[in-house]
Image: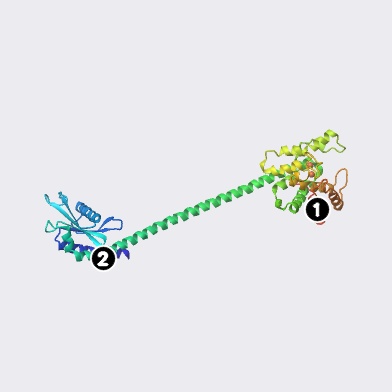
Amino acid sequence: VTSAVVERGIERCGGLLYRAVETVEASCGALFMVDAEGAISVLAHTNDAHGDLLALMEQAAARTAEANRPVRMEYPSSTATGRAGSIRVCLGTPVFVDSEMVGALVVTDPASPGMSAGVVMDRVTSVLALLGLSVERLRMIDALEQRESEIGTLRQQLDVYAMDFRSTYRAERDRSQELSSALAELEKTYRATVRGLAIAVEAKDECTGGHLQRVTRYGMMLTELVAPEHTGDPQFEYGFLLHDVGKLTVPDAVLRKPGALCDEEWELIRAHPISGFSILDGIPFLAGAREIVYCHHERWDGTGYPQGLAGDQIPLGAQIFPLCDAFDAMTSDRPYRKALSIEDALAEVRHGAGSQFWPTAVEAFLSIPVATLESVLAESHGGLQ
Ligand SMILES: [Fe+2]
Ligand SMILES: [Fe+2]
């Protein structure tokens, strides 16, 4: 639609241009549009106005736009632009609409060579008025098209941004999926490592069938009750599972000795929390578990080992754990005695509140239904798999 309108506008300008050229009996004529920034572009010209001649006329138009009034320019004629030996005269006349210059009409070599640009303007006044309207219209269309193309460019840029954004988002999403699956893989590796270590401990200490699995269950249950913020904390779970990892360094002859132990042998046994602490040294993912391993033989009243810590000096996991360890030892058969009943073992646990065990943990442990404790005891006699 626009281009048809433009074509008609330019045609009309061409017609008016010929009228002006005839009116002053000029040799050639051209009409230029002047945009809001003062840039010049040719709208129409007579048939023989082209090449160097059109370039000269464009110069005259630019001069007219700059001066904002009629301008007369003379160029020494070259063979290319005019009759040999003569002077080429260009007369530029502004085309106004409401005193704004929208175009420039340039004619060359009028019939009377001395004619001034002002005279040209006077003689073509009515043509200039009509040209003004036509040029103004073309200028508006031009501005509109420019806006449209600007909007088109903006839209294209937006499309590019949107595409960039989508591909960045997709890449980030893929990356985070990769990361989380790598993390899950790592977590699995950690678990397998801890399990492997725990199985080694269990194999070493033959009489503990299922002990590690059960104390870990009790420990996690109790943690949920007295330290809910650590519910499911893998450091607690790993610490409970690995509490006796230090026993790996105690000779079998001592660990499995049926009779009473001498002082030296006791020293070896009592060193297992320290050995466990060293075994887990330099394993960042077991840093929290290592604290529990180190302190799992501390007592609430400060008479435990290896450091003799008391009460809140003992790391939280190791405040929770000892009564689980003791309860399971009491409810398991040992070579030298039969297992206690759950009720008797609970009575012993109650008895240890404040001396061996953290009173709050004792109270919480006693609140666990006996049926729950029975089911833990029943399900895990096979040991770790
Ligand atoms: Fe131990
Ligand atoms: Fe134990």
Name the disc covering residue 363, or none.
1
Q: Tell me the amino acid under the disc marked 2.
A: Leu
Give percent across and percent down for residue 220: 74, 51
Query: Number of numbered discs present?
Result: 2
Q: Earlier in the sequence, mark 2 or mark 1?
A: 2
Viewer-closest of 17 and 240: 17
For image coordinates 60% across by 50% down, the residue present is 180
Left or right of 381, for residue 108: left
Marks 2 and 1 in Cβ contact (< 8 Å): no
Q: Let me know if residue 103 appears in the view.
A: yes
132 is higher (above) or lower (below) than 254: below
Give the quadrant of the N terminus: bottom left
Q: For the residue marked with disc 1, what is the amino acid?
A: Glu
- Under tag 1, what secondary structure? helix
At 54% from the left and 51% from the top, the residue drawn is 172
Q: Quadrant of residue 70?
A: bottom left
Q: Answer with left or right where residue 316 lies relative to residue 21.
A: right
- Does label 1 point to a residue whose CB lies under 8 Å from ligand 2? no
Q: Position of residue 136 (x, y in %)?
A: 28, 63
For ligand 2, the image quadrant comes to top right
Q: Name the foreground residue: 4 vs 77.
A: 77
Give the SS element for disc 2: helix
In screen coordinates, is 295 left or right of 187?
Answer: right
Separation of residues labelled 2 and 1 (CA atoms): 99 Å
What is the basis of the colouring in this image? Answer: rainbow
Q: Quadrant of residue 255?
A: top right
Percent coordinates x, y for residue 317 in the rendering: 74, 47
Q: Which residue is mark 2?
A: 133
- Asked which quadrant contains residue 71, the reply is bottom left
**Residue 385 in sight from this viewpoint:** no
